[in-house]
Image (tube, rainbow, N blue to C red):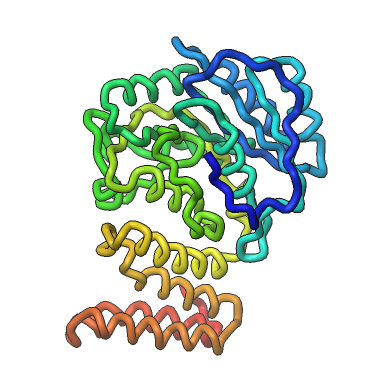
Amino acid sequence: MKLIPDQYIKEKVEIYPHKEASKPLVSVCIQTYNQEEYIRNCIESILNQVTDFEFEIVIGEDASSDKTRDICIEYAKKYPEKIRLVLHKRENVIYIENQPLGTFNGIYNMQVSKGDFIATCDGDDYWISPNKLQKQIDVFRKDKECALVFGNYNILKSDGTQSQKYELGEISSDKLFDIHYLLSINVMPAYCTLMFRKEFIPSPFPNFIFDSFNGDWAYLFVFANKRKIGYIEEPVSVYRLGVGIVSKTNNYAKLQNGLRANRAINAYTNFEYDYHIGNEEWLIKNIAFSLLENKQRTKGVLKVFYKLFYSFSKRKLKYFFKENKQFLKHATKLLFGLNTK
């Protein structure tokens, strides 16, 4: 399976020496870069999984400038039959909105994985349920049409406190559902909780995957389009808030990228979800606000007019004024530097 087009491979990737074990049912793919504070916790939480099947751990290390690579090599030496370590070079890193992301790393992990199922986790996140993999495979075993299973998770804040993402009743594990249902309840599967069938991965990946800032969002439409999705209600993972590059990136860049990604996803899915991702007004509004907040007044004003034009084309005149009153009020405050509270 070749998931990455040749134009993205600038340098040959090295696989650290390991022992070939029996074919795993699941490949757990970790991507990591400059995460020496967190990577041990991540790896240990996966090694502690209790399953009735074999699984491997594929670690993609992105040529860190700290001790992350040394720690990964330490674990690869200690568990040569369980861990396969992929040693990357910075030349292969894909930049999105001028930010180096782990896109190549993550997809290459999937490409070299040997399991029939793939689970994913970033190196700064970790798992808290020792039965995470088992529970997900149990869901897959019940229905061969199920393409993806994700779980609830805790959000770890900088002050050390945790909060559960989804409360009981927001989403249930009683039955399988589809992307339409997730969109209707505004639920987004987190990367650190995912498991999906490898056979459903397109080869190669569509181009928009290599240009999408929000990979979690893009992967959902690639892995589960028109297929069944399962859910584990209990928190199975912990997501560290405010640690990754995405959380530290300019909001305008992320919103602009989201607009382009949605248009590409819309075309890729033959406009199956156009009623949701085709509605660009929310993104356009926040792009305008972001530009004005950053004192880019000319571009901001142009986006304000674009938002108004978009809104006018979608609704009747009496609703146009009602819907845009607060938008114009806030945009004006931002434009003239007034207190927006």
Q: Position of residue 240 (x, y in %)?
A: 57, 40
Residue at x 59% of width, y 83% of height? 296
Seen in the image, is 21 located left or right of residue 36? left
**Which of the 4 quarters of the picture holds residue 61?**
top right
Residue at x 48% of width, y 73% of height? 287
Q: Position of residue 174 (x, y in %)?
A: 23, 28
Q: Is residue 2 visible?
A: yes
**Which of the 4 quarters of the picture holds residue 196?**
top left
Seen in the image, is 29 located left or right of residue 167? right
Residue at x 74% of width, y 28% of height? 72
* Vertical side of 323 occupied by 147: above or below: above
For the residue pair 92 and 164, the one nearer the viewer reads as 92
* Vertical side of 104 occupied by 59: above or below: above
Q: Where is residue 263 in the image (x, y as percent from the top left)?
A: 40, 67
Residue at x 42% of width, y 18% of height? 134
Q: Position of residue 198 (x, y in %)?
A: 44, 34
